[in-house]
Amino acid sequence: MSQSGIDLGSLFDAALKTVTANRQKINKMDSEQGNHGDNMANNLKIITDALANRSEESPADALQHASEELQARGQSSSSQYYADGLSQAAEKLQGKDQLEQSDVLSIIQSLMGAVPAQRSTQQVNTGESILQQVAGLATKQQPKAASQKGPDLGSLLSAALPAAMAIMEAKQSGADPTSAAFSALIRGLVGGQVNPLQANTPRAAAGGLVAQSLLKALLG
């Protein structure tokens, strides 16, 4: 475990519990197969199991191991996209011995940016990602906010979560909190305006819950 007390296994266990609690709602959104919630709960269990007892490894090595396990044993096409996201996150964290708060934003961005919101008959990442779709909920659920200048991300986090200011160092870890989609996503999830279950696809709903859970677990 890093000196900052951040444990990858605990973060993803929080995501597992949240998705498991909402798996039936996600299944109902899945008009094609009706099992996306079940599949995502299984995939997150694979990730948490892979991360268990690996707190002494570097964050990059632990994430890469989780990626390989998910690649080999995951269910549904989404598992392969999440495996890619974990691998991308691992690459960004190469050379770091400890996991910082800001690194978790980088992990969230990598995961949500790697998964397309819509299913495809081909294993190709095309169209908008779940990051873009869930971030779009912030604008839809706050129509007035779109025409008014609100606080910047740093001010929002500083006011609501003083202990989380280190998150703003995310640029140094590869995340880009200044990008419109990612900034909107974090604003919505931190401020509580975004309900991932109101997304248009089961993938986006599950992915939004994963991101929200990781963020809440990080900030306590």
Image (cartoon, rainbow, N blue to C red):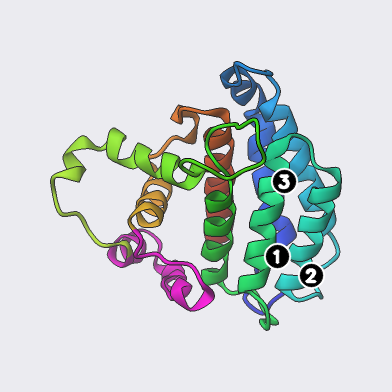
Q: Quadrant of residue 66?
A: bottom right
120 or 208: which is nearer to us? 120
Q: Residues within 10 Å of mark 3 (few under 14, many from 20)?
A: many
Q: Quadrant of the C terminus?
A: bottom right
Quick check: is 109 in the magenta stretch? no
**Whole-percent x, y for residue 76 in the image:** 74, 34
- Residue at image coords 68%, 68%: 90
Give the extent of the magenta segment: 154-179
Residue 7 numbered mark, or none: 1
Residue 65: % across, % down: 81, 62
Dominant secondary structure, magenta: helix
The mark nearer the N terminus, 2 or 1, is: 1
Asked whether disc 2 touches disc 1, contact meaning CB atoms under 8 Å apart, the reply is yes
**Sequence-wise first label, 2 or 3:** 2
Foreground residue among 44 and 216: 44
Q: Which mark is residue 80?
A: 3
What is the three-letter code of the residue carrying label 3? Gln
Figure quadrant of the N terminus: bottom right
Q: CA distance from mark 2 to mark 3?
A: 24 Å
Kind of element beneath mark 3: helix
Asked if residue 162 lies in the magenta stretch, the reply is: yes
The residue carrying mark 2 is 55
Q: Nearer the viewer, mark 2 or mark 3?
A: 3
